[in-house]
Amino acid sequence: MMTDGCCRHIAIIPGRAGSKGLPGKNRYLFDLTADFIQESHLFDRVIVTSDDQVLLEMAQRQGFEIRARPPELCTDEASMKQVFEDLVANMPIKPDDYLWFLALTLVFKDADDFRHAKDIIEKERPSSLCSFIPAGSHPYYCWRVDEKTGHMERFIDHDLYRRQDLPDAWEEYPYLYSIRADSLDQANSNLIRGDVYPVFLDQGQAERMVDVDEPKDFITWERTHPHHFHEWRERLADDVDLPGLSKKKS
């Protein structure tokens, strides 16, 4: 799995045992990301960090390294930055290693997108890299309630009225995300730095993204990538019954 670049690229797969929206999702979706890693040959190492013993055993069968995540980092309050800092403190990771966040719930991954991002890192050596998609709601349209006066105020004060005068607005989307280990201290809780190298995804690419976090997301996945969805569905055992997912046809 070793790559030829002059810095190491380490895939990090976080996967807690608990899931409120879709219980057991990380176990069921794990093989999709594992297959992507094995087939793409993009990463020098793979580390799975989890408190789920079943998931850790699945990772070991793939030949991946594991980190039994401490209980305090398995709560809803724990940030991804804390999870990455735990890895750097307890695993053999060098300051100039690039840590790639691979979310199990982002089920569709295009190897060409990742190769492009990796090429950027090899050439530019940024502190971090993250993909961005067009903002779903422009921040210039957003308002809030002033708690003292009860009046409505714009989040961003302006008097623009023509849509074409609005500045471009993007939101972070960790489909592609990598950060250099020695840059973690200046990242925010979501691992984003102000000097992040942005990879802009257009609207078409954004619409191809599928984040399976709730039962309804299976419908989006099947509609957006039917072949990919049904190929995954056929690999599940017949007795697997996930919320919102119909039984396999006999």
Image (cartoon, rainbow, N blue to C red):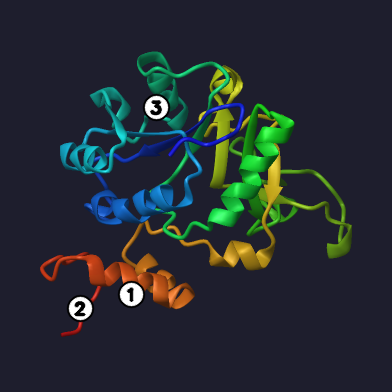
Position of residue 7 measured from the top left corner of the image (x, y, whole percent)? 59, 26
- Looking at the rendered structure, the kind of residue marked 1 is His
Tell me which label, 2 or 1, sits earlier in the chain: 1
Q: CA distance from mark 2 to mark 1?
A: 9 Å
Identify the element where label 3 is drawn.
Answer: helix
> Where's the N terminus, which quadrant?
top left
- Looking at the rendered structure, the kind of residue marked 3 is Val
> Where's the C terminus, which quadrant?
bottom left
Residue at image mark 3: 83
Position of residue 123 measured from the top left corner of the image (x, y, whole percent)? 72, 34
Q: Along the horizontal axis of the image, is 127 left or right of 42?
A: right
Label 2 crowd bin: few (<14), some (14–19), many (20+), radius 10 Å: some
Label 1 crowd bin: few (<14), some (14–19), many (20+), radius 10 Å: few
Residue at image mark 2: 248
Residue 70 badge: none
Looking at the image, how many numbered discs can be counted on the residues? 3
- At x 64%, y 39%, the residue is 149
- Looking at the rendered structure, the kind of residue marked 2 is Lys
- At x 74%, y 51%, the residue is 169
Q: Could you tell me if residue 196 is visible in this image?
A: yes
